[in-house]
Amino acid sequence: MARCTPWDCSRRTAAGSAALAAATWLWAPLLLAAPVGAEPRWRQGVFPVAHFSGYTSHFGTRIGPGGTPEPHHGLDIAAPLGSPIRNWWGGRVQEVIRDGGCGLGLVIASGPYEHLYCHLAGSVEGGVYRSGAVALAAGSPVQGGQVIGHVGLSGRTSGPHLHWGIRHGGRWLNPAAILRAMAAALSRARP
């Protein structure tokens, strides 16, 4: 897939407007949870890659390395090796991952949402993920915008990038559609 900016990439995904509508509906509880007069909670979301280079794979069905269609439950965001990865939303580390697909990764729970970060640099020993000054284990609290790792090449990858997935109620959401919905809402909110 051709690279594009953070805000317009979802126009090129297979999920299209149906995913945008679904993303808007699923984020509605967060929009409604803010007290009257308070800044809506969705404004707290932080784009996870500090040094964005482009998108390299979209959410949805794609052709895998074996040449067959496969589901892709996230968005691949290219960035220079070692670039900081920021947590999208405050929450707690639910799981530290070390496997052949995701490589080194984290699952962070934020209320009913789970955020998946894969292909991180660093190491996992004794259930603790470490990268530079970062040390996180299951149960560790994390803030929105906090550096939680660095872009790496772990797992099944052909270049440095972050695989970022969002799940709600066991259902994978299209992160690009959520970013577009948030950008549109921010644009409408500006005076």
Image (tube, rainbow, N blue to C red):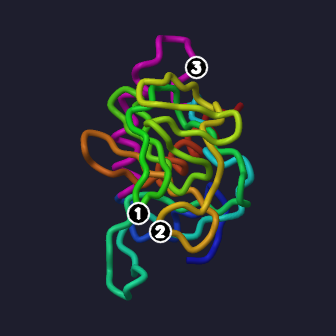
Q: Find residue 101 and name its label.
A: 1
Q: Give the range drawn in magenta.
A: 19-42
Please determine whether, in this image, residue 11 is positioned above or below residue 19.
below
Distance from Cα at disc 1 to Cα at disc 2? 5 Å
The foreground one among 67 and 14 is 67
> Earlier along the polypeptide chain: callout 1 or callout 2?
1
Residue positioned most to the top: 36
Counting other residues with Cα less than 10 Å from the Cα at mark 3, is it few (<14), some (14-19), or many (20 or more)?
Answer: few
Q: Mark 2 points at which residue?
A: 156
* Residue shown at the point (43%, 51%) measured from the top left: 98
Residue at disc 2, secondary structure: loop
Q: In which quarter of the image is residue 69?
A: bottom left
Q: Which amino acid does label 2 sit on?
A: Arg
Residue at disc 3, secondary structure: loop
Please determine whether, in this image, residue 144 is positioned above or below residue 24.
above
Q: Name the residue under label 3.
A: 39
* Residue shown at the point (55%, 12%) measured from the top left: 37
